Image (cartoon, rainbow, N blue to C red):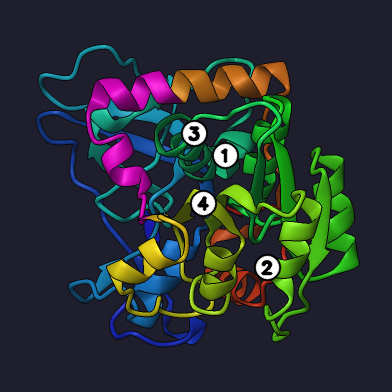
Amino acid sequence: MNHRILFRAPGGPEVLEWVEAPLKAPGPGEARVRHTAIGVNYIDIYQRSGAYPVPLPAALGFEAAGVVEALGDGVAGLDVGQRVAYVDGPTGAYSEARNHPADRLVPLPASISDEAAAALIFKGLTAHMLVRRVWRPVPGAWVLVHAAAGGVGLILTRWLATEGVRVIGVVSTEEKAAAVRAEGAAAVLIVPRGGSYGNLASEVRRLAGGKGVRVAYDSVGKDSFEASLDSLAPFGLLASFGRASGALPLVDVADLGRRGALALQRPSVFPHVADPADLRAAARELFEAHAQGAVRAHIHDRLPLREAAQAHRLLESRSTQGALVLIP
């Protein structure tokens, strides 16, 4: 019998339930995927908590790797037994198996394991979006990366550093700082969890020669938003792609001009890979970067799928370094 994780009302991790989920044969254009590894992402927490409302009851999960078990009518380019991964909706990756649109599946090369793919594809394609669509790396430029020891942060830091960018990472502990330095960060600043970001911008400007950074990549949200803006050089860009500390404040567009003709963007990986051809091209570049060592799949811990609630508690504690992977 197939099982999955779902929730019937928004709330804490305790609302997650392990339930039976019988599967029909895959429909036209679908493939059945038997999951071998499932990625956990902060968007899962936003949905579970009600920060991002979804129709209820709801399944969770956008990211997984596995093996094709069956194909529906009209599916071409995939074979039964082939290793694949995916990174988008409909939600339901927190399951032992599922039927998924076949044109949204990405074939996995032999160079990457299933667990690494599940840990990497959502976060890695987010990093790909940030370095290929939001801002193309300029060697020698200074950038700021918040939550630099997180799932996206470690990947992004290494990718930027590999391309010659000078990264200032922000983390909450010295242990995390060491991990970020190991990925190539030029400097690391520590803001303890619950601590103040009040002095961050002045430290960032000092490190960047007094002018500020070209780009601030901010997945923290409410707590770090003002510090990110204050850290930017004139005509700098704030790429705000998360809200781990809470909803973002309202922005007066005219204030961006007064601060130095700044730009603000709210990028999302889903438009980045909305076209199946774009998805597969971005995934190929990501897997090539992984094979060459420009990015790494950092797995903080592996937990049984039944323990998805514990994975959410770990992620919300902001104590993790890298990704959490659920194993069916």
Mark on residue 319? none
N-term-proximal mark, 1 vs 2? 1
Q: Give the range drawn in magenta.
A: 264-282
User: Crowding near pointer 1: few (<14 within 10 Å), some, many (20+)?
Assistant: many
Task: Kindly indicate whether the residue at mark 1 contacts the one at mark 3 (C-beta within 8 angstroms).
Answer: no
Task: Kindly indicate whether the residue at mark 2 contacts the one at mark 1 (C-beta within 8 angstroms).
Answer: no
Is 35 above or below relative to 74? Answer: below
Mark on residue 201? 2
Is residue 198 toward the left or the right of residue 101 in the image?
right
Report the residue that reaches farthest toward the top. Answer: 77
For disc 4, the marked residue is 234
Q: Is residue 275 covered in magenta?
A: yes
Classify mark 4: helix, strand or loop. strand
Task: Kindly indicate whether the residue at mark 2 contacts the one at mark 4 (C-beta within 8 angstroms).
Answer: no
User: How far across and how far down the image is residue 27, in percent?
Assistant: 12, 35
Q: Is residue 9 covered in magenta?
A: no
For disc 3, the marked residue is 128
User: How far across and how far down the image is residue 72, in percent?
Assistant: 16, 27
User: Crowding near pointer 3: few (<14 within 10 Å), some, many (20+)?
Assistant: many
Q: Which residue is drawn at 30% across and 55% down?
A: 91
- Viewer-proximal residue among 67 and 252: 252
User: How far across and how far down the image is residue 143, in percent?
Assistant: 64, 46
**Which residue type carries mark 2?**
Ala
Q: Distance between the residues labelled 1 and 2?
A: 30 Å
**Which residue type carries mark 4?**
Pro
**Which residue type carries mark 1?**
Leu
- Viewer-proximal residue among 301 and 203: 203
Instruction: Point out the frontmost of discs 3 and 2.
Output: 2
Is 146 above or below relative to 267? Answer: below
Q: How far apart are marks 3 and 2 (CA)?
A: 26 Å
Classify mark 2: helix, strand or loop. helix
Q: How far apart are marks 4 and 2 (CA)?
A: 14 Å
